[in-house]
Image (cartoon, rainbow, N blue to C red):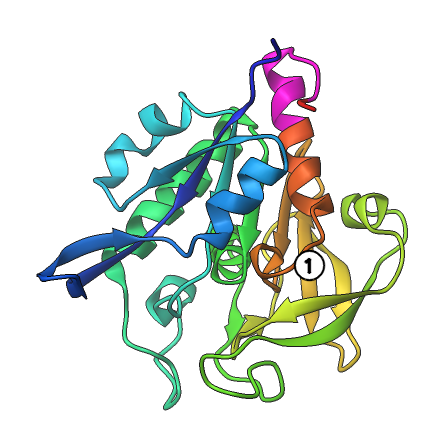
Amino acid sequence: MTARPLIGISTYAESGVRWGVWRLDAVLLPAGYPRLVQRAGGLAAMLPPDAPQRAAATVARLDGLVVAGGPDVEPVHYGAEPGPRTGPPARARDAWELALIEAALDRRIPLLGICRGMQLLNVALGGTLVQHIDGHAEVPGTFGRHPVKPVPGTLYAGIAPEQTSVPTYHHQSVDRLGTNLIPSAYAEDGTVEAIELATSPWTLGVQWHPEMGNDLRVMQALTTAASALRGQPSPP
């Protein structure tokens, strides 16, 4: 039986979450993330915030890494002051996920950043962010859709060569690209919608939320790359 690759997914950490009769601190992940990994042939493992010095040992046990969406990256990480519409910081997540990204890049394991995860990948490599854009989060708490167009010759274009309608919800975007990052998809308004690392075998960031749609191709490409790293055939 083919061993499925183990894909770690970073999580939220929230205080006083209520479910049933309980109100407790919790680590959370929208179910779409593990479901997408599972549908794409992987085993999903949640990676709640931890001490950054443990990131390397954590990543060493994984075949692939997904950095999930979530709150705004604190602007101090890219040398800026918070804008008036920038959300409150999530410092434990920032520190942990930056360390996870560094460890994944060091080990050259497949890495996918989703929304915040793409932005954090850019920041980790010295890039900056636009702290607010309009038109990509129309209704609070509701995902919209818009088309993205791949850049020919990129990793992403090899996965999805045609213009594709994607689920989206974000109010920040990539500004200056980090070292060795290249854009691999754009929205119609010119917003960078995907980035990838030219010096890495498989490092991709997407600004949209594939976990909220039915297109498995991006996650299947990650799990295929993760299986190849293990020396295993791709999972069925």
Q: Quadrant of the C terminus?
A: top right
Q: Which is the main secondary structure of the residues drawn in magenta? A: helix
Q: Is residue 199 visible?
A: no
Residue 106 is situated, as x and y percent measured from the top left of the image, at 49, 29
Q: Quadrant for residue 50, please give it.
A: top left
Q: Quadrant of the N terminus?
A: top right
Count the numbered circles shown. 1
Depth check, front residue: 9 or 196: 9
Depth check, front residue: 34 or 54: 34
208 shown above or below 93? below
Disc 1 packing (10 Å; few <14; some 14–19; many ≥20): many
Residue 118 is situated, as x and y percent measured from the top left of the image, at 55, 57
Does residue 50 appear to the left or right of 126 in the view shown?
A: left
169 shown above or below 213? below
Does residue 195 appear to the left or right of 137 in the view shown?
A: right
Membership of 83 in magenta stretch: no
Residue 44 is situated, as x and y percent measured from the top left of the image, at 45, 35
**Residue to which mark 1 is pinned:** 194
Q: Quadrant for residue 90, please give it.
A: bottom left
The outermost residue toward the front is: 20
Residue 95 is situated, as x and y percent measured from the top left of the image, at 30, 51
Give the residue drawn at x 63%, y 31%. 223
Span colored in magenta: 225-234
30 shown above or below 101? below
Give the residue drawn at x 58%, y 55%. 178
Give the residue drawn at x 47%, y 44%. 34
- Report the amino acid beneath label 1: Ala
Q: Is residue 205 visible?
A: yes
Does residue 170 appear to the left or right of 217 in the view shown?
A: left
Tag 1, which secondary structure? Answer: strand
Give the residue drawn at x 52%, y 61%. 119
